[in-house]
């Protein structure tokens, strides 16, 4: 099976908690549902999955999403509204398209669309895989 690009969306972001239990629908769930609906109309829907994640450990910067693919840098964005405007949703998918198109997944600030120009939490470099490790992985696959 070929690896897919993935947009992860934290579904516990902007939760309301009472006595250790989450109350109602979180902001992250709302954001995931909104992005998931629009994902169905996106030209890259077959190549770029959208997946929920229970926690991305950026609670003080919610709501969060990330873009990931083996061999590319992973980006983590925060401070997103749980209810993006139509233009902001289009901006998220535009930025994801740029990530998809770049061989290393680079997203320079000036090339990012709104709302992902602000709120960058991390750019994690792709792991370096040696030729020996790559050969071992292909044998076990």
Image (spheres, rainbow, N blue to C red):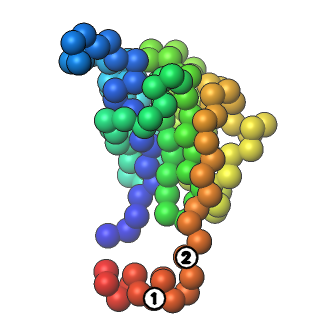
Residue 81 shown left or right of residue 22 in the figure: right
Residue 111 percent location from the top left of the image: 74, 39
- The residue beneath circle 1 is 135
Residue at far right of view = 110
Dot 1: element: helix
Image marks 2 and 1: residues in contact by CB distance under 8 Å:
no
Residue 12 percent location from the top left of the image: 34, 26
Q: Which mark is residue 62?
A: none
Q: Residue at x 61, y 42 (%)?
A: 122
Q: Residue at x 41, y 87 (%)?
A: 136
- The residue beneath circle 2 is 129
For the C terminus, the image quarter is bottom left
Real-space Cα separation, disc 2 to disc 1, in angstroms: 10 Å
In this view, 128 is above or below 16:
below
Q: Residue at x 48, y 83 (%)?
A: 133
Residue 98 percent location from the top left of the image: 63, 47
Residue 125: which quarter of the image? bottom right
Residue 25 shown left or right of residue 106 in the figure: left
Dot 2: element: loop
In this view, 11 is above or below 53:
above
For the N terminus, the image quarter is bottom left
Q: Nearer the viewer, residue 114 or 18?
A: 18
């Amino acid at each position: 099976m070929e690896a897919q690009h993935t947009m992860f969306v934290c579904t516990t972001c902007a939760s309301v908690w009472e006595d250790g239990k989450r109350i109602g629908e979180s902001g992250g769930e709302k954001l995931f549902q909104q992005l998931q609906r629009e994902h169905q109309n996106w030209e890259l829907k077959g190549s770029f999955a959208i997946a929920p994640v229970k926690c991305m450990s950026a609670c003080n910067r919610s709501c969060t999403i990330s873009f990931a693919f083996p061999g590319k840098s992973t980006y983590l964005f925060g401070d997103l509204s749980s209810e993006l405007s139509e233009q902001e949703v289009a901006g998220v998918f535009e930025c994801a398209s740029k990530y998809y198109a770049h061989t290393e997944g680079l997203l320079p600030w000036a090339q990012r669309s709104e709302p992902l120009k602000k709120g960058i939490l991390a750019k994690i470099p792709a792991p370096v895989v040696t030729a020996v490790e790559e050969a071992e992985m292909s044998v076990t696959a």
